Amino acid sequence: MNNAVLDLIEKLEKQRSLTLDEYEYLIENRSEEAYEVLRKKAEAVRKKIYSNEVYIRGLIEISNICKNDCYYCGIRAGNRKCERYRLTDEQIFSCCEQGYKLGFRTFVMQGGEDAWFTDERLCKIIGRIKALYPDCAVTLSLGERSKESYKKLFEAGADRYLLRHETADKEHYQKLHPQNMSFENRLECLKNLKEIGYQVGCGFMVDSPYQTNRTIAKDLKFIEEFQPDMCGIGPFVPHKESVFANHPQGTVELTCHLLSIIRLIKPNILLPSTTALGTIDPDGREKGILSGANVVMPNLSPEETRDKYELYNNKLTTGAEAALQRNALMGKTEKIGYKIVTAKGDIKK
Ligand code: SAH
């Protein structure tokens, strides 16, 4: 490994910050050796703050109806072959009930941008979940909404919001999205969510089409400056009915490398080892944890809709609803020296 890379890793560890050029250099010159150095440092800081605990979040995919046409996404509006669904309130509560019994203390409601879910409807659902499970966190991942809307949902009890910035480079953003979607609005939403008081998550896909080492450097700089509470990164995986059907899927190697870097940028960040990582490699989730991730988000969606929320092809659809599945996940996690815990899992300040 070249000395400049080692120096940069040490600088990052000490200062939690690099210049844009330095981030780019670090990614450009990555190697197995450099990864191992980064990984060990990432594991060490993570263990100092979160010990060997892994938080679990129950993911409830409430709707695959979406008004947007993001070029990478399998549930984009333009995909006529996608069979659409929307969960009823009762279905959502039933997912929470099952999840609670299995030890989940965070419920993540994710979906396409589906206008049926008005503020009024969502506030009622959030209020009910919080009333039934006051010891749980409610996380939303429902895309771009107005500041007033985010405020109402927060006042109804939502604690956290995940909105990946997708890329911190405007030109790259425009290559991933149609013209009617705006980079500025995405960033404005993230700023608003933070101002309101949510624990906020940003994030991006690894090896997305037209991504370069420079755009990744910008993503890292953005994370460093925005200081999100959470950051979701996972490999891009093509979907055959999307505009990017023929683009290659991302790698475990780069994803894990970036997980370690992000852990060093913000030692206390809540960093999921994503489903996409588990999809491209049967041991992907464990590799993510070993690279500094401290969260996993198993699926709690009802069995009958689960395979319809297909953001990308071959997405893992094994749920956590069966106690058996959860035991398998726990077993695999324990094997690498970590343990899944029943906890709300807020960020440690
Ligand atoms: N509508 C919500 C939720 C989007 S789905 C929102 O706008 O935030 C959650 C995330 O899945 C997206 O932010 C995107 O980064 C990721 N995703 C979508 N398509 C993908 C693909 N083909 N491969 C990997 N990740 C994908």
Image: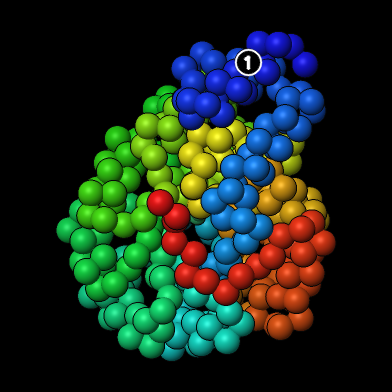
Callout 1: SS? helix
Label count reads: 1
Residue drawn at x 74%, y 11% as measured from the top left = 2
Q: In the rendered view of the protein, which quadrant contains the N terminus?
A: top right
Give 50 or 118, whichever is nearer the viewer. Answer: 50
The correct choice, above or below, for 210 with respect to 305 in the image is: above
The correct choice, above or below, for 181 with respect to 136 in the image is: above
Residue 232 visible, this orientation: yes
- Which residue is labeled 1 in the image? 7
Residue drawn at x 37%, y 32% as measured from the top left = 225
Q: Position of residue 123 (x, y in %)?
A: 27, 75
Residue drawn at x 60%, y 18% as measured from the top left = 8
On screen, residue 259 versus residue 322, left or right, reads left
Q: Which of the 4 image quarters holds residue 55?
A: bottom right
Residue 249 visible, this orientation: no
Name the kind of residue labelled 1 in the image: Asp
Q: Position of residue 101 (x, y in %)?
A: 57, 87
Q: Position of residue 147 (x, y in %)?
A: 20, 53
Q: Position of residue 3 (x, y in %)?
A: 71, 11
The correct choice, above or below, for 111 with respect to 2 in the image is: below
Mark 1 Cα-neighbour bin, 10 Å: few <14, some 14–19, many ≥20: few
On screen, residue 138 versus residue 245, left or right, reads left
